[in-house]
Image (spheres, helix red, strand yellow):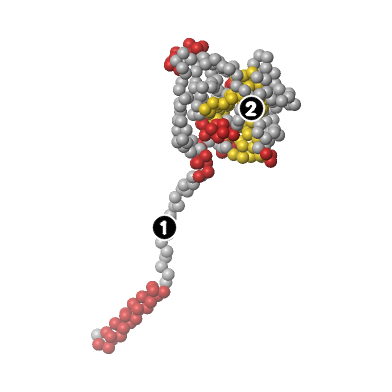
Amino acid sequence: MPEKEIRRRAFLQLSAGLAAAGLGGCASPRPTVTRSYAPEPVPETNTFLADMYGEKPNEPYPLPAIPYEKIEPRFYRQMVADPTGEKPGTLVVDVGSHFLYRVYEGGQAMRYGVGLGRAGFAWAGRGVIQYKREWPRWKPPNEMVARQPELQQFSIEAGGMDPGLKNPLGARAMYIFQNGEDTLYRIHGSPEWWTIGKSVSSGCVRMINQDVVDLYNRVPNGTPIVVTDLSGGGMVQSQPMPGSQPLPESQPLPDSQPLPRSPDYMLMGPDGLPLPQPL
């Protein structure tokens, strides 16, 4: 092949290669698609609730933190518009909705979630917080010990169950009287925070220990209290002690002086189970 022809073919091949290279440089490469999945969002800690239901190390028996995330938010302690119409300073237990209110000025009320036992439905009406106790002892009555011999170690003769985290009466108890008579109705703490908002087998009005401590500090002896049903069912039927009658609306509430009590006296609820006892 003539040398001239060889040079011409080489030039053409080089030109074609350069052209191809030029076209390739101008073209946008096909993007590589990479799927990425964002991590599930981690719920932020509610610092207000974490503090409200956090540990209380300064108690005689330090209270552990409550897993508030597992409780329905409507049962958290919170200030709400007062639905009761009662005078400021009054306590109102709404058995229909499992709420307890402490009424304030300006149409406001502090609302707490509560659990109710059968004894909690046994009385309704008006009374007073006659007295209150911190870390009360639990003394099952002899009749209960006879049915459950394993409770002998906590009997009246044995001095009852020491206060503490496992005590079924919790960190505080408040005792409701009417016309100077014990109604057998109490507000007390409970280590069983999961029963708040529910009806359980025993007890009266039980609260989260952190909540009952808060309420205890807001309630002096002689505080008026109303137990009713605000859910639309009307006032629940009262079953007061013999000789005890509900107070009329206009009648002044009785004095709040504690009554003398025998150290071995044990109050019983209508279900035959012990009720919170003072120290």
In the image, 170 versus 197, the foreground residue is: 170
In this view of the protein, can residue 123 be seen by the observer? no
The residue that label 1 is drawn on is: 34
The residue that label 2 is drawn on is: 222
Q: Quadrant of the N terminus?
A: bottom left
Q: Is residue 46 above or below residue 223?
A: below
Q: Is residue 40 above or below residue 226?
A: below
The crowding category of the residue bearing disc 1, from other C-alpha atoms within 10 Å (few below 14, some 14 to 19, many at least 20), is few
The residue depicted at 62 percent of the width and 37 percent of the height is: 110
What's the CA distance linking mark 1 and mark 2? 71 Å
The residue depicted at 69 percent of the width and 18 percent of the height is: 245
The crowding category of the residue bearing disc 2, from other C-alpha atoms within 10 Å (few below 14, some 14 to 19, many at least 20), is some
Residue 25 lies in quadrant: bottom left
Disc 2 residue type?
Answer: Gly
Q: Nearer the viewer, mark 1 or mark 2?
A: 2
In this view of the protein, can residue 87 be seen by the observer? yes
In the image, 178 versus 101, the foreground residue is: 178
